[in-house]
Image: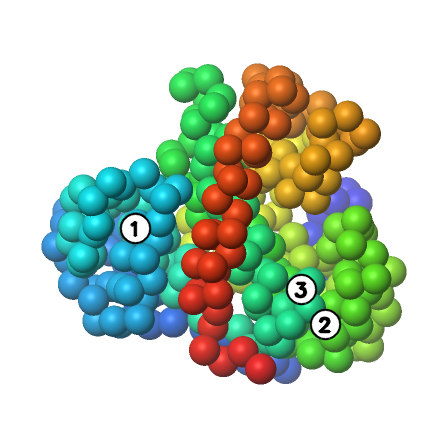
Amino acid sequence: MVAARANEDSRSVEERIKRVYELPPMPELGRRILKLQSDPNASAHELADIIQLDPSLAAQVVRYANSSCCGYTDRATNIQEVISQVLGYDMVMHLAIGLAAGRSFCIPKNGPLGLKKFWEQAILSAVLVQRLGAAIPASLRPAPAQAYLGGLLHDFGVLLLGHLFPPEFHLLNKMAQANPKQSVAELECRLLGMGEAREMLAMGHAHIGAWLMEVWYMPTPLRIALLEHHNSEYQGECDVLVHLIQLSDFLLQHGEESSGKCEFPKFSLHRLQLSPEQAQQVFAQVTQARAELAALAQQLMGNCAT
């Protein structure tokens, strides 16, 4: 009864915000790729043709495919080659959706929650979630492309908050700078806003992000992952993806401290059938490419950043 009432209240807030504010639309290119995703007869050539309509997006995908984390020894020169020889159809589709979606927001570049840091963390998280997914038993593994997109987009609620409510986002950004060891979920509970901003903050960025995924008609596993990625004991649909993101967040937040001083999320490790040592090993491998991934992230920032 309480949960049903809370859900009803959240829907009421969402409807009011949609009436008063203009939600950022999914870019046209992203919508076309999502439509292609739902077509069982779609081909790699069709995907390549859509992505090539945006030369800058195509260049970003090719650049990512040529990074060392993809392990391709030659050098890809076009989208068709990336699809057929490097990343595969599903991975290119999910990567292009994520990159296109990221262009929807107008928020500051600087600060721990600004676009610069956001994309650095998002790319690192995407690779880490994907690699952690590859380390768990085969019977549990989500599709690699799904794991990547979940890691890439799981904090999109923060971007929506910044896009709709710049003053509150400015304060949240300053709080994150002063409290680097605290998560956004912890900080937003302490931040006071006015009107709809206050109600959005009360919902939390996880709920906000999941709502945006729903508005954009994104796949159900992605909506669930965004909604539940701070629910440490989540059990239900897509729980493996949820706990991969939680484990990735823990490793990225605590870094080297996770080797002894900080306690790993036990429920996530149990669900994923991973040991702390295995998780730490994957983290160490991914962070070897941190500088390269950070450089890639700088080329992924939205054009409307301020």
Lateral position of residue 84 relative to residue 177, left or right: left
| Of callouts 1 and 2, the N-terminal one | 1
| Of callouts 1 and 3, the N-terminal one | 1
Question: Which quarter of the picture shows residue 299?
Answer: bottom left
Please tell me which residue is depicted at 20% across the width and 52% down the height of the picture: 76
Q: Which residue matches tag 1?
A: 66
Lateral position of residue 127 relative to residue 108, left or right: left
Please, what secondary structure does the residue beneath circle 2 have? helix
The amino acid type of the residue labelled 1 equals Asn
Please, what secondary structure does the residue beneath circle 1 have? loop
The residue mark sitting in front, 1 or 2, is 1
Question: Which quarter of the picture shows residue 62?
Answer: bottom left
Quarter of the image that includes the N terminus: top right
| Other residues around mark 3 within 10 Å, as few (<14) / some (14–19) / many (≥20) | many
Q: Where is residue 241 in the image (x, y as percent from the top left)?
A: 52, 35
The amino acid type of the residue labelled 3 equals Leu
Cα distance between the residues tagged 3 and 2: 9 Å
Q: Is residue 297 above or below residue 244?
A: below
The residue mark sitting in front, 1 or 3, is 1
Please, what secondary structure does the residue beneath circle 3 have? loop
Q: Are marks 3 and 2 in contact (CB under 8 Å)?
A: yes
Q: Which residue matches tag 2?
A: 169
Cα distance between the residues tagged 1 and 2: 35 Å
The residue mark sitting in front, 3 or 2, is 3
Cα distance between the residues tagged 1 and 3: 27 Å
Q: Which residue matches tag 3?
A: 113
